[in-house]
Image (cartoon, rainbow, N blue to C red):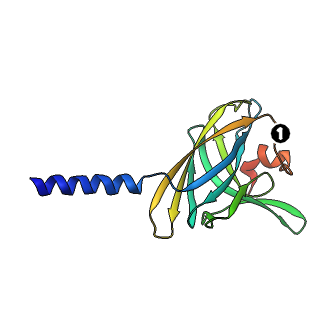
C-alpha cells in the first residue's frame, strides 16, 4: 500500500511538472481589432524563452483556425505563409511577433474582436527533449490602425483565405 501511494505521488508530480508553464516571458501581447464581418486577425507580442523551445501550436476559443505565419518579401511582393515546422524560441533571445513579420493568424473568427477585448491564446511549446507544455497568454485588442511597425496590407488580413500555403 505504501509503495502504491509513493508511486501515485511520483506520477502526479511528474505529470504536473510536464504540464507546468514553460519558462517563456511574454510582453506586450495584443490583437488587432476587427470590423463586423471580418473573419481573420493577427496577434502580436514579444517572447523570450529561458531554454531553447519551439511553438508547435496555438489555440484560441475565438477562432476556428489559429496558425503561426510569417510575412516576407518575395520578388518585390509581400507574401504570407504558415510556418509548418513551428516557431523557434532560442534561449535568451527575443522573438518578436509583429505586423509585417512573424505573427499569430486567427481565422474563421467566431465574432467581432472589439478594441479592449481580452483574447485568450494557448501556446503549445516543445522543448529540445520533446516535452510539451502550454503557455496561457491574454492579449488585449487594439483599435484598427494601432500597433507598432509596418502593418500588413489590409487585403492580407481581410482576404486571407486566398493566400496559398
> What residue sits 13% from the left and 58% below the top?
3
> What residue sits 73% from the left and 59% below the top?
70
> What residue sits 85% from the left and 51% below the top?
149
Q: Is residue 154 above or below residue 78?
A: above
In this view of the protein, which residue sits in the foreground, 131 or 56? 131
Quadrant holding the C terminus: bottom right
Q: Residues within 10 Å of mark 1 (few under 14, many from 20)?
A: few
> What residue sits 44% from the left and 63% below the top?
131
Question: Residue 18, percent across and down?
Answer: 40, 57
Q: Is residue 154 above or below residue 25?
A: above
Q: Quadrant of residue 72?
A: bottom right
* Residue 15 falls left or right of residue 31: left
In this view of the protein, which residue sits in the foreground, 118 or 106? 118
Q: Is residue 47 above or below residue 117?
A: below
* Residue 86 falls left or right of residue 100: left
Give SS at disc 1.
loop
* Residue 160 falls left or right of residue 59: right
Question: Residue 105, percent across and down?
Answer: 68, 49
What residue is disc 1 on? 146
Which residue of the protein is positioned furthest toward the left in this rendering?
A: 1
Tally of numbered tags:
1
Question: Residue 162, percent across and down?
Answer: 75, 52
Question: Residue 50, percent across and down?
Answer: 57, 62
In this view of the protein, which residue sits in the foreground, 17 or 68? 17
Amino acid at each position: 500500500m505504501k509503495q502504491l501511494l509513493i508511486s501515485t505521488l511520483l506520477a502526479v508530480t511528474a505529470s504536473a511538472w510536464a504540464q507546468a508553464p514553460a519558462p517563456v516571458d511574454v510582453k506586450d501581447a495584443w490583437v488587432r481589432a476587427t470590423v463586423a464581418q471580418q473573419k481573420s486577425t493577427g496577434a502580436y507580442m514579444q517572447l523570450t524563452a529561458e531554454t531553447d523551445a519551439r511553438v508547435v501550436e496555438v489555440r484560441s476559443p475565438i477562432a476556428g483556425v489559429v496558425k503561426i505565419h510569417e510575412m516576407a518579401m518575395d520578388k518585390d511582393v509581400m507574401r504570407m505563409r504558415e510556418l509548418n515546422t513551428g516557431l523557434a524560441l532560442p534561449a535568451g533571445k527575443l522573438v518578436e511577433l509583429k505586423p509585417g513579420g512573424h505573427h499569430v493568424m486567427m481565422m474563421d473568427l467566431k465574432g467581432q474582436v472589439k478594441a479592449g477585448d481580452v483574447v485568450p491564446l494557448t501556446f503549445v511549446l516543445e522543448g529540445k527533449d520533446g516535452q510539451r507544455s502550454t503557455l496561457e497568454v491574454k492579449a488585449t485588442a487594439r483599435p484598427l490602425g494601432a500597433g507598432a511597425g509596418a502593418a500588413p496590407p489590409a487585403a492580407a488580413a481581410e482576404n486571407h483565405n486566398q493566400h496559398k500555403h
